[in-house]
Amino acid sequence: MAATTSPPPPFPIILAPSWRHIGDMPSVRIKNVPEDTHRVLRQRAATAHQSLQEYLRSRVVAKASRPTVREVLARGDDEADAVVIFADAVKAVRADRDRR
């Protein structure tokens, strides 16, 4: 007796990898973005060879990693009692300039 084969399914079967994230990362959703702004951001993402999500995520991370002027000044208030010797400050500035 010959083996029978079943007909192929009427739709292609695609096995997609299951993505697992280690830990849950919070999400941010921005609503009511003007169409012109959205268009510019999509174009910039494409120019950077990134998805819009990747492009915006990199911008948000970069922005959050730099302190604001207020945050820098607040740190200075915490160190207001520190003593800096002028000659040491001059050496530090010169060393920094020489590295550039």
Image: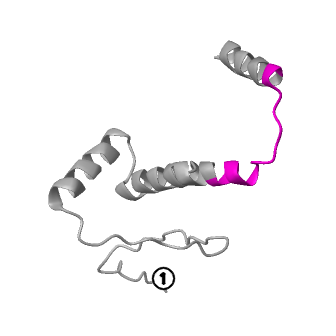
Q: Residue at x 47, y 82 (%)?
A: 2
Between 70 and 9, the one lying in front of the other is 70
Between 24 and 99, the one lying in front of the other is 99
Between 13 and 40, the one lying in front of the other is 40
Q: Residue at x 29, y 80 (%)?
A: 10
Image: 5 above or below 96: below
The magenta-colored residue range is 74-87
Q: Is residue 23 visible?
A: yes
In the picture, residue 29 is in which quadrant?
A: bottom left
Q: Residue at x 42, y 71 (%)?
A: 14
Q: Amino acid at mark 1?
A: Ala
For the view shown, which residue lies furthest in the left direction?
36
Left-right relation of 38 to 94: left
Residue under label 1:
3
How many numbered marks have been drawn onto this rendered protein structure? 1
Image: 42 above or below 28: above
Q: Is residue 79 magenta?
A: yes
Question: Percent from the top left, x then y, of residue 70?
Answer: 55, 53
